[in-house]
Image (cartoon, rainbow, N blue to C red):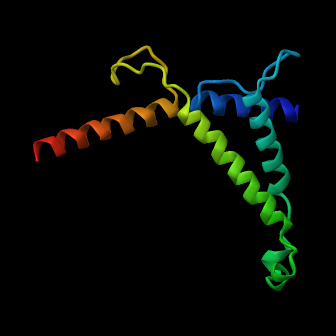
Amino acid sequence: MKSLFLELVMNVMMRMIAGKRYYREGDGEILEEERKFKEIVKVAFELSGVTNIVDFVPVLKWVGLNKIEKKLTILQRKRDDFVQNLIKQPRKSIGDPLSEGKSKTMVDVIYLCKTLIQNITRMISSKA
């Protein structure tokens, strides 16, 4: 039951952000992007409950007992790469920003805002 709830929450969250499902039913082919997302979620949950002894005894950092920090750094890098790939994927034609009936993801809205800001900046700089 716990894993079903996690899958539901992750699917809803990623459908809003990227418009894709990353937890699928059945034994179908698992895409590389799905595998990376599942790995990131798994490692994030594993590291979220770990106590970092270096936080309590900073001297141990000089001894080299900061393995958790290294794992967190690697996780952050993987997470950044994953999100960058979501943003860099070819954007579907957004069209009119005020059009109704089209569902937009958060990435689409951010891309649209970026495009509008670039256009406004271009217009202002051309008038000056």
Kindly indicate the quadrant of the structure image that contains residue 1: top right
Q: How many marks?
A: 0
In the displayed structure, does residue 13 sit left or right of residue 69? Answer: left
Front position in the image: 128 or 27: 128
Position of residue 56 measured from the top left corner of the image (x, y, whole percent): 81, 79
Position of residue 3 measured from the top left corner of the image (x, y, whole percent): 86, 33
Position of residue 18 measured from the top left corner of the image (x, y, whole percent): 59, 29
Position of residue 32 measured from the top left corner of the image (x, y, whole percent): 76, 28
Kindly indicate the quadrant of the structure image that contains residue 57: bottom right
In the displayed structure, does residue 71 sit left or right of residue 18? Answer: right
Above or below for 25 versus 72? above
Task: Name the residue at 71% across, 47% down.
Answer: 78
In the displayed structure, does residue 5 sit left or right of residue 84? Answer: right
Q: Residue furthest bottom?
A: 59
Front position in the image: 97 or 101: 97
Above or below for 37 versus 95? below
In the displayed structure, does residue 125 sit left or right of residue 78? Answer: left
Kindly indicate the quadrant of the structure image that contains residue 21: top right
Q: Residue furthest left?
A: 128
Task: Name the residue at 85% across, 81% down.
Answer: 60
Task: Name the residue at 17% across, 44% down.
Answer: 124
Task: Name the residue at 86% across, 35% down.
Answer: 2
